[in-house]
Amino acid sequence: MKFTKIFKDELDHCYAIMRLKHADQDFLVVASEEKQPCYAYDLNNDYARTVVWPDVGGTMTMVQIPGTLNFLATQRFYPGFNSAACRIVKETFNGRGWDQTIVGDFPYVHRFDLLTKPNGAGYWYVGCTIANSKKDVDDWSDPGKVWVGDYDDSQEQVSNLRALDFRLTKNHGYKRMDGYALITGVQGIFKLVPPTATHDWQLLQLSTTETSDIFSADINQDGKPEYLTIEGFHGPYLRISDHNFKTITKSAADTPFGHAIWGGRLGARDYFIFGWRSGKQDLELITSDHLATQLIDEQVGPSNVTVYEKDGQTYLLSANREANQVAVYAIDLE
C-alpha cells in the first residue's frame, strides 16, 4: 500500500478533524487546540479554504448534526487540561460559510457526542469530562464525570443534563459504536448503552486496564472485531485485543504520547492507523494483529486521523500537530 501526500496547509497545533458531507457539498474541517482558527477545505473546489472561526480554538471534539452541514464543537479547552471555561458552540452553514451560536458552557468536557434516538425522536447528548475541577493542570484529585442529556437542535440547547453515578479519571478516548459508545480512562474501558423503555443509561466495564484511546477493526480477518488501544494516558503502549478484550499482543514502551488512532477497511481488508506525538512522531499503518507496521510519514506528530473516500479514491486526513500541518494523503490500495 502506498501513501502520497497530495495536500498540506499550515495550522498551528491542529487537532480536531472531521469529514463534513451532505448532499452535493463536501468539506474537511480542521480545528486547533490553541487560540487559532478552524478551517474548512472544500473537496469539490481543490481544497479551497474557508475560515469557520478565526481565533478561539481549544477544540477537542467536533460532531456533525446528521442530515446537515451544521456541527457542534468544543472551544476553550485550554490552558492544557485546566479547561473550566470550555464551551460547546453550534456552527450553521449559510451557503458560503458558518454562523456560530453558543450552546452553553460545559466545563472540562473533553469528548462529547450526539446519539440518535429511535424513530427520529431527536438526539441524546453524551459528554465526558477530563476532570470535575482542578487546582492546576497536574491536579487529578477530582475525577471527571460522564454527562447525559437531550439535545434539541431547533432550540440549540442541551436539556435534562445529569451526571451518571460514576467518576472517570483522565478520560481521553471515546468511540461511537453501533447502538452504544466506548469510553476510556484510568479505570479502563466502558460500554455506554443508551436508555430504553425498560432501562436507564447503562455503563458496563469491559476492561480494567488504563486506556487512553480505542478503535476497532477486524485486522486478522477472523470475522470478529479486534481492538487497538493506546495504554497509559497518551501512551506509551499499544495493545491489540480480541473481541473479548483478551490480549493478542502488546508493544514495548516505544510509542510515547500515542494519540492518533483509526481502524477500518482499506481495499480488501481491515487495518489500523496509529501515530504518536513524541519521540519519532511517526504515522504508521498497522498491518497485522502482532503490530507489524508500515511507515506512512515521519516526524509529523499526528493528533487525529481519519480515512475517507471521494470519487472512487481513498484518502487519509491527518492533523499533523507537531508539524503544525494539515495533511491529506492519497492511498494506493494496490
Image (cartoon, helix red, strand yellow):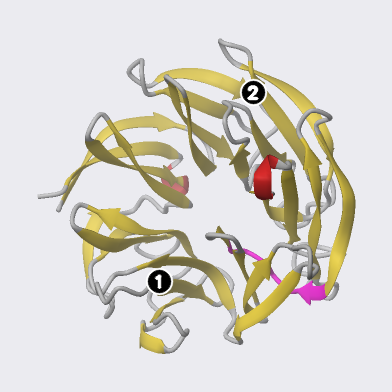
| Residue 73 lies in the magenta stretch | no
- Residue at 56% over, 10% down: 96
Question: Which amino acid type is marked by label 1?
Answer: Thr
Above or below — where is 3 with respect to 130?
A: above
| Residue 170 lies in the magenta stretch | yes
- Residue at 35% over, 75% down: 224
In the rendered structure, find residue 281 and report the number of the disc placed on it: none
Q: Position of residue 147 (x, y in %)?
A: 80, 59
Q: Is residue 329 left or right of residue 172?
A: left
> Which residue in the rendered view is the most extreme toward the top?
96
Dot 2 corresponds to which residue? 54
> Disc 2 versus disc 1: distance between alpha carbons?
33 Å
- Between 170 and 309, the one lying in front of the other is 309
Q: Is residue 295 left or right of residue 29?
A: left
Above or below — where is 28 with respect to 125?
A: above
- Density class for disc 1 (Cα within 10 Å; few <14, some 14-19, many ≥20) is many
* Mark closer to the chain start, 2 or 1: 2
- Between 270 and 67, the one lying in front of the other is 67
Magenta segment: 166-174
Q: Position of residue 160 (x, y in %)?
A: 90, 51
- Residue at 42% over, 67% down: 216
Dot 1 corresponds to which residue? 255
The quarter holding residue 152 reads top right
